[in-house]
Image (cartoon, grey):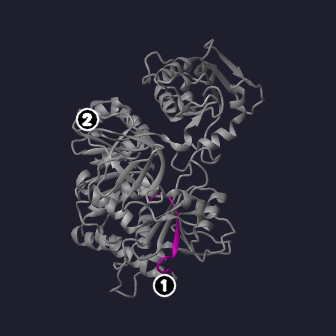
Amino acid sequence: MTKTLPNIPIPNEVTQNLAMMFERNVQLFADKFIFCQRDKTNEYQGITWKSFYEDILNIAWNLKQAGIRKGTKVILYCPNSLNMLKAEMAIMASGAIAVPIFAYFKKNTSELLINHSDAEYIILAGPFQFNELSNNLPKIKTIWTFESLNNDTKYELRNFSDLLSQRNEQDYKLDTQAYGKEICLNMYTSGTTGVPKCVQLTHENILSQQASIHTILNVTSEDRFLSYLPWHHSFGGIFELFSALYNGATYHLESSFGKDVHTIFENWKNVHPTVFFSVPKVYQSLFELANASKEAEEAFFNSGLKFIFTAAAALPQRLSDEFEKRGINVIEGWGLTETSPCCTLTDPKLKREAGVVGMPIPGVKIRIAEDDEIQVNGPNVMVGYYKNDEANEGAFTEDGWYRTGDVGEVTENGLKLISRKDRIFKLSNGEKVIPTDLEKAIELKCHYVQYAVVAGSGEEYPVALIFPNKKLLNQPDYAISPEQGCFCPRNINEMGHCLTGCLQLANQSIGQKFAKIKSAAIIDDELSLDNNMLTPSMKVAPKNVIEKYKTHLQNLYGDNVPTDEEVYIIELEPNNNFKRCM
């Protein structure tokens, strides 16, 4: 028997297409800044809606002269920037299809995605991206670059400034006649469960979201965004970005791209953001800097800050309390690239519950199937995966609901997430284990743990592979200890002795005895994009990790297989001892 969450219709009219959104906003906000980024003198400089609109008209017209037509696909291979924003919006609002990919993909991955996309044109940032282009891109006709580059390839290379040159047709318009169901964006999933899938999204997918959440988030043209989330990913490139664009707010590009918390904090003091979208680890780091002085605290919790939004994981309660006691709302949500992405939002007036991600936004229907899978229906759901019949066959139910692959349940305050369906495994006795519960508990207990992966399919009991935060081990922070009594380890050996207690505490947070780990391996190695252990959104790819480190798993179950990495094994039963394996 399926269970359905309450749903309500969208209260606002859905704008038909992005071109119409831009035409409307340039009239409403002509002289307001749409986007700001730091210049060569390290000062934030802005561009007005009027100037931005002129630029995208020029880009769209010049793309048309280059041969781009309705439905033509253009790869965007670049980090967030003003030029990327202009290019992407011009493509999407002129009838073509934007295909953003991670700016630092290496050659093999960029070749795979570019060829799979059937794109005919590429816009890229500079020498890194150009050097990572394969010679085997048969459909590519022209490449535009933000930087001037020497070309020793077979491809036609042009400077992006050519696209900004003044159009000959002054009355040229964007594609305001586009139907809402026309595809304008192809976005690749992060690939946590295998090869990335190409999600086809429409004007209606994107704009129905904004019509739904307009009155919920209450973003206005007076708001200031400080943003680093990458635009090739749906959280940053659809939900956050269009929350700013749709409402005429000013988007300030965070100059470290989220990589340096000290720079984020300096930008924060400069911009005084009114809304901020991020993940828990960044909030934790910013809060630690805010604790340095009264001045820093006042700058961080500035009087204009209306709400913070967190995704990927719940914000720890103690951090949430710090915002809420100052009248700053903490909002969480849930969704996937395939759902454009937002499906639910929490109500900040309700007490937060672990795992609860709120009620469906207007227009979105959510139900729990008999196998506890969460299924979604609404104007936010994708058209389907591009060139992936196998994935499309399993993506939708017979009555047209999208199968999310997430497992959840209905609660009084909304949807509660349990796990990814494909992460749940059975032990040899048939008991089901939800590994994500214990992984989160381990990572929360000790911030010297960078990542934890729990495995044990078909075995008698679960075990854990643990990857340390090497930066923190090399430079321990004695002033900030995640748990009382933490020894602040300086190396793998000390961490091994120290971690036993934290693992026991993490085990205690799991109700079922069979789901507790009996041993763990601390592996002196790093998960990264380059070794395919992390996705571009910095999530662990569990299947890849389990496959690469399967010899360590064998050793945890009693074998004695030689390994390349230095490993320390913690036995939690029966002796609570610790040993080093070479």
Q: Is residue 426 above or below residue 388?
A: above
Q: Is residue 227 above or below residue 493?
A: below
| Disc 2 from disc 1: Cα separation | 53 Å
Dividing the picture into quarters, in which one does residue 298 lie? top left
Q: Bin the neighbour count of mark 1 within 10 Å (Cα to Cα): few under 14, some 14-19, many 20 and up.
A: few
Residue 99 is one of the magenta-drawn residues: no
Viewer can see residue 39: no
Q: Start and end of the magenta stretch?
A: 68-80
**Whole-percent x, y for residue 282 in the image:** 42, 40
Instruction: Give the labeled residue for mark 1.
Output: 65
530 horizontally vs 322: left or right: right
Q: Which residue is nearer to you in this view: 205 or 323?
A: 205
Q: Quadrant of the C terminus?
A: top right
Q: Amino acid at mark 1?
A: Gln
Residue 324, labelled with which disc? 2
Question: Residue pushed farthest top?
Answer: 575
For the point 63% across and 32% down, which residue is it?
456
The secondary element bearing badge 2 is classed as: helix
**Whole-percent x, y for residue 221 in the image:** 23, 59
Q: Quadrant of the N terminus?
A: top left
Viewer can see residue 241: yes
For the point 44% across and 55% down, which residue is it?
234
